């Protein structure tokens, strides 16, 4: 009988190379061949610079929602709408199939009761679509993935506390999707005001049981990964500034904004937390966001749906 041991207890170094170091190249070749799909949803009231932030993140005009609209004032839809735009971004032969889903109309009305419902429904609809494709007798070799991997939740820089609508929406979102909260247009606050606001928001998170914000902290993580995630979580919400305008700073063009406090350099970590936010989202945790969506949130949805079918048949 072949007996196994607890995973990781026995570690063996081969006496001669067996080729495991080529796995990294295999993964890279697969990535080069198929690319990577990454789906973001942005949620927040109008006027918080959501489109500008997306353009800042990807250093391109990825949010061209109203390209044919020449009106000066944005039109607020009567209910929350869901709009998705997709791009293929290529850098050093790596193709990122990026989809950005916006939610115009959220929080912009006198009566915002249950304005989060279309958002939750859209997220669950993508899970259902993926599940339906998985259950087909003849499945596609690669199922198109429209599941939302991350919701970036924009908080207005009021300097006070979270609005009731923010609390209610976040409590529901964290149950179905990865959520990263950011304080929008953080340059409207002084550094002291910003820190005090962040502390109030963190207290609101704790008081209202909003603890499952991304990144996850669980026992299955390696110690160094756990500590990195803990450090990131302690920074939430990120206080960010977006801009697609370059200014000359000491002869060097940099993304920046002019404010009453002076010039805010977008990618200067001493001015705002955009660099930390970008690094986590794109440089260190992008693949983990995709994996967490599949292994935690989608798996939870899939299990519940199959249980409903089983209960209906019994």
Image (cartoon, rainbow, N blue to C red):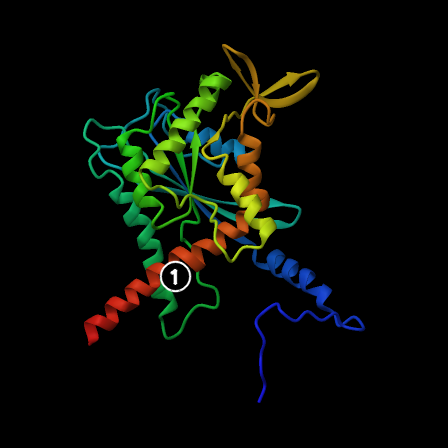
Image: 214 above or below 3 = above
Locate residue 111 relative to residue 305 in the image: left or right: left
Disc 1 crowd rating (10 Å Cα; few below 14, some 14-19, many 20+) is some
Question: Which residue is label 1 attached to?
Answer: 299
Instruction: Between residue 242 and residue 137, name the one nearer to us.
Output: 242
Q: Position of residue 57 (x, y in %)?
A: 53, 35
Residue 66 visible in the snapshot: no
Q: How many marks?
A: 1
Residue at 59% in and 86% down: 2
| Rendered image quadrant of residue 168 | top left
| Rendered image quadrant of residue 302 | bottom left
Q: Secondary structure at mark 1?
A: helix
| Rendered image quadrant of residue 268 | top right
Residue 201 visible in the snapshot: yes
**Residue most extreme to the bottom:** 1
The quadrant of the rendering that contains the C terminus is bottom left
Image: 310 above or below 124 = below
Locate residue 174 relative to residue 282 in the image: left or right: left
Q: Position of residue 175 (x, y in %)?
A: 34, 49
Instruction: Between residue 15 and residue 72, name the one nearer to us.
Output: 15
**Residue most extreme to the right:** 16
Q: Position of residue 79 (x, y in %)?
A: 23, 36
Q: Position of residue 74 (x, y in %)?
A: 32, 25
Image: 202 above or below 160 = below
The quadrant of the rendering that contains the N terminus is bottom right
Residue at 43% in and 54% down: 293
């Amino acid at each position: 009988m072949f007996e196994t041991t607890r995973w990781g207890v026995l570690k063996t170094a081969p006496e001669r190379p067996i080729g495991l170091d080529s796995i990294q190249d295999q993964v890279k070749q697969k990535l080069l061949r198929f690319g990577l799909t990454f789906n973001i949803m942005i949620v927040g009231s109008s006027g918080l610079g959501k489109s500008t932030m997306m353009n800042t993140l990807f250093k391109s005009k990825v949010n061209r929602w109203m390209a044919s609209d020449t009106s000066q004032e944005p039109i607020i839809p009567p209910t929350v709408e869901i709009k998705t735009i997709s791009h293929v971004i290529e850098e050093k032969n790596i193709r990122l199939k990026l989809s950005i889903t916006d939610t115009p109309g959220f929080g912009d009305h006198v009566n915002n009761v249950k304005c989060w419902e279309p958002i939750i429904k859209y997220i669950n609809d993508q899970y259902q679509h993926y599940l339906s494709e998985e259950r087909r007798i003849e499945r596609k070799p690669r199922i198109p993935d429209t599941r939302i991997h991350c919701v970036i939740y924009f908080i207005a820089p009021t300097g006070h506390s979270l609005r009731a609508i923010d609390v209610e929406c976040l409590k529901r979102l964290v149950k179905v999707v990865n959520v990263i909260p950011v304080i929008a247009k953080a340059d409207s606050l002084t550094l002291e005001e910003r820190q005090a606001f962040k502390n109030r928001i963190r207290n609101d998170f704790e008081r209202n049981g909003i603890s499952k914000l991304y990144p996850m902290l669980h026992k299955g993580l390696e110690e160094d990964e756990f500590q990195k995630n803990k450090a990131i979580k302690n920074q939430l919400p990120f206080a960010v500034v977006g801009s697609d305008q370059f200014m000359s700073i000491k002869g060097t063009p940099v993304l920046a904004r002019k404010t009453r406090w002076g010039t805010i350099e977008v990618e200067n970590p001493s001015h705002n937390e955009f660099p930390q936010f970008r690094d986590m989202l794109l440089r260190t945790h992008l693949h983990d966001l995709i994996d967490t969506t599949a292994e935690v949130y989608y798996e939870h949805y899939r299990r519940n749906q199959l249980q409903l079918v089983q209960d209906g048949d019994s």
